[in-house]
């Protein structure tokens, strides 16, 4: 199983989100991102979660943003070059 996926998500500074956190409010926009769905210290650090399909079921995973892509074309090229099959834009 690959531990990186590409998704279009809203950026946030922390798990509290833009309603509570001023830093999250400042960066509140949607971007295409490379996500690590198996980050270090899982369960020990507060992170957002995302649903990921695994063996026909939807499983919730914590994630870290590894990279933000400038365009859909750049994200698809990265996915092709690195063998990432789980891409939802």
Image (cartoon, rainbow, N blue to C red):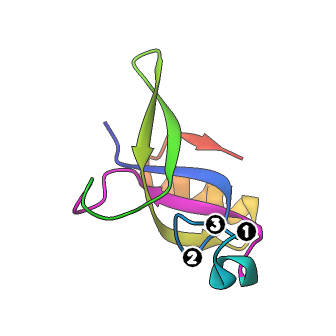
- Tell me, for residue 13, which label it has, or none: 2
Residue at screen point 53% across, 36% down: 51
Q: Do the residues labelled 1 and 2 touch (CB within 8 Å)?
A: no
In this rendering, position of residue 55 left or right of residue 42: right
Give the quarter of the figure containing the N terminus: top left
From the viewer's side, name the closer residue of 62 and 21. 21
Asked if 45 appears above or below 84 in the picture, the reply is below
Quarter location, residue 87: top right
Q: Does the magenta stretch include residue 48?
A: no
Q: Give the range drawn in magenta.
A: 27-41
For the residue carrying disc 3, how many other residues have a C-alpha within 10 Å: few (<14), some (14-19), or many (20+)? some
Asked if 30 appears above or below 51 in the picture, the reply is below
Q: Residue at label 1?
A: 19
In this rendering, position of residue 3 left or right of residue 52: left
Q: Position of residue 78 (x, y in %)?
A: 55, 60
Q: Are marks 3 and 1 in contact (CB under 8 Å)?
A: yes
Residue at screen point 41% across, 43% down: 61
Q: Residue at label 3?
A: 17
Quarter location, residue 42: bottom left
Asked if 41 appears above or below 13 in the picture, the reply is above
């Amino acid at each position: 199983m690959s531990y990186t996926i590409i998704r279009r998500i809203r950026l946030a500074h922390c798990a509290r989100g833009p309603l509570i956190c001023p830093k999250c409010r400042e960066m509140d926009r949607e971007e295409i991102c490379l996500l690590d769905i198996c980050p270090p210290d899982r369960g020990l650090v507060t992170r957002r979660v995302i649903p990921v399909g695994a063996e026909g079921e939807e499983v919730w995973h914590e994630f870290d943003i590894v990279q933000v892509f400038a365009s859909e074309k750049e994200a698809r090229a990265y996915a092709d070059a690195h063998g990432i099959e789980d891409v939802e834009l």
